[in-house]
Image (cartoon, rainbow, N blue to C red):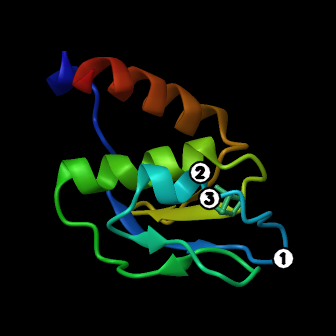
Amino acid sequence: MGDAIELPRVRRFWVNTETCIDQRRCVIEAPLFVSDSEQRGGPIITSDRPGNEVEMLALLNAAWVCPTASFKLELEDGSVRDSSDRDLRELCKAWSKVVG
Ligand code: SF4
C-alpha cells in the first residue's frame, strides 16, 4: 500500500515565530530536526536536511500537528504547506496508516 502513495520531498522547513505558541508538538514528531528552547519564539532548528522517507515523514507530521500552522514546509514542487493544508493532512493520515 505504501507504494501507492507518493511521499513528497521536503526541500526545506521553517517555523513562523510570530504565530508559534511554543507548544512543542513538532519537537515530539521531528526530534531529529527541532528541539526544545528555554526561550519563547519557537523550537531550535537543529538540522534542515531531511534525507530518507522516514525523516521526510517526520517533518510532514510535525507540520500536520502544529495547532497554529506555524511549521512550514517547502516541497520539491515549490509549494509551501502547513497544517491548514487539507492535502497535507490527508497525506499524513494515509502514511500514518502505512507505517503504523
Ligand atoms: S507545534 Fe507549531 S506552535 Fe508548537 S512549537 Fe512547533 S511550530 Fe510552534
The residue drawn where x is 62% and y is 62% is: 71
Mark 3 to mark 1: distance in Å?
Answer: 15 Å
Q: Position of residue 84 (x, y in %)?
A: 73, 43
Mark 1 to mark 2: distance in Å?
Answer: 17 Å
The residue wearing badge 2 is 25
Query: Which amino acid lies under the numbered mark 1 shown in the image of this protein?
Result: Glu
Which quarter of the figure is the C terminus placed in? top left
Query: Which amino acid lies under the numbered mark 2 shown in the image of this protein?
Result: Arg
The residue wearing badge 1 is 18
CB atoms of marks 3 and 1 within 8 Å:
no
In the rendered structure, find residue 71 and report the number of the disc placed on it.
none
Residue 70 found in image quarter? bottom right
Q: Is residue 19 left or right of residue 6?
A: right
The residue wearing badge 3 is 24
The residue drawn where x is 62% and y is 58% is: 24
Q: Identify the element where label 2 is drawn.
A: helix
- Dot placed on the residue nearer the N-terminal end, 1 or 2: 1
